[in-house]
Amino acid sequence: MLDPFGRTVSYLRVSVTDRCDLRCVYCMAEDMTFLPKAEVLSLEELDRLCGTFIGLGVEKIRLTGGEPLVRRDVMRLVRSLGERLGPGGLRELTLTTNGTQLAKHAEGLFAAGVRRINVSIDTLDPAKFNAITRWGKLEQVLDGVFAAKAAGLAVKINAVALKDVNEHEYDTMLAWCGEHGFDLTLIETMPMGEIGEDRTDQYLPLSLVRQRLSKQWTLTDTDYATGGPARYMRVEETGQRLGFITPMTHNFCESCNRVRLTCTGTLYMCLGQDDAADLRRPLRDPSVDEDGLRRAVLEAIGRKPKGHDFIIDRASRPAVARHMSVTGG
Ligand code: SAM
Ligand code: SF4
């Protein structure tokens, strides 16, 4: 699948639910209203749609959410997508999770063919973790992370860089990740959805973080790429990687290879734009066959925009009205 700017689309992120068992302050308001079940695609519908994308050249699928592991029976979808791994099909099936349910599912994920996962942990301080996630217990998440490691999954920790909240902890987190063999990616906050707080108070540019970390650590640029937007450095002291996702300070759109499917079958061609295509209608229309569904997908890819225009300042509303939990980051 080629978009109008010559970029090959080979990566599909699928938000399998908009629900979550946490309420991270930068992601959701505490009193979120979730979608009625009838609007949400069944696991079979999600599987079929993923199959259509794979048939069109998608090689990597990441399940996300909301929290993917809180969707009932989600492992059924993981297993059926796992069966699509292999020549002519998927090269990678992976997942981004908050880790709360990971202890239960780590072995099943590995058995289904998942080899790498991202776990979001913004701080290693239990009280702060609880404050950021509103409802989370760090200990439960760490149990999940170590269960994943024991099951053979490579773990990357994702942390959102939050001014005054975790900004002085990246040293500790780098050391901890080094000790346990995890990579670490830091993410700048993006202005998505009303969260009941002022985002200018949260935004911390990663260029500043790099300057600070360089005082303690030897960070060497690498050309390592996972097909994602992160730029990776090698942390010479630990041998692990440190990634930066910098939508605000660095435009990562020129190499964008992905599109995002929500749990209602809406396809967003860009994380930072509102244009979308409704794939649920053709999916549920008995008169539309597989060819028709493919045409609907290709028509949407033909509208993939050049890039986003995120801005964070006090006067602006969120760049897009939907929350990150709709498309899963
Ligand atoms: N619940 C899962 C989790 O937390 O990993 C998957 C979905 S979550 C929306 C995916 C990633 O987006 C998480 O790493 C989260 O920290 C990040 N995220 C959420 N809201 C964000 C925002 N406004 N700006 C930047 N990253 C955000
Ligand atoms: Fe839930 Fe993930 Fe959003 Fe936190 S970042 S509220 S865990 S979806």
Image (cartoon, rainbow, N blue to C red):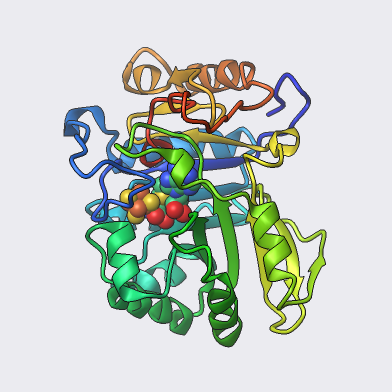
User: Residue 142 appears in which quarter of the rendering?
Assistant: bottom left
- Of all residues shown, which one is farthest toward the bottom? 179
Give the total number of marks visible in the rendering: 0
Tell me if residue 56 can be seen: yes
Which of these two is toward me, 291 or 180?
180
Position of 29 relative to 149 (above/below): above
Position of 220 relative to 202 (above/below): below
Which of these two is toward me, 319 or 262?
319
Residue 117 % position (x, y) = 50, 64
Residue displayed at 51% across by 33% down: 52
Which of these two is toward me, 31 or 206?
206
Residue 225 % position (x, y) = 73, 56
Residue displayed at 68% across by 76% down: 240
Residue 213 % position (x, y) = 68, 69
User: Residue 289 appears in which quarter of the rendering?
Assistant: top left
| In this picture, residue 79 sits left or right of residue 187 | left
| In this picture, residue 279 sits left or right of residue 55 | left
Residue displayed at 72% across by 26% down: 2
- Of all residues shown, which one is farthest toward the top? 287
Q: Quadrant of the N terminus?
A: top right
Residue displayed at 74% across by 74% down: 215
Tell me if residue 64 can be seen: no
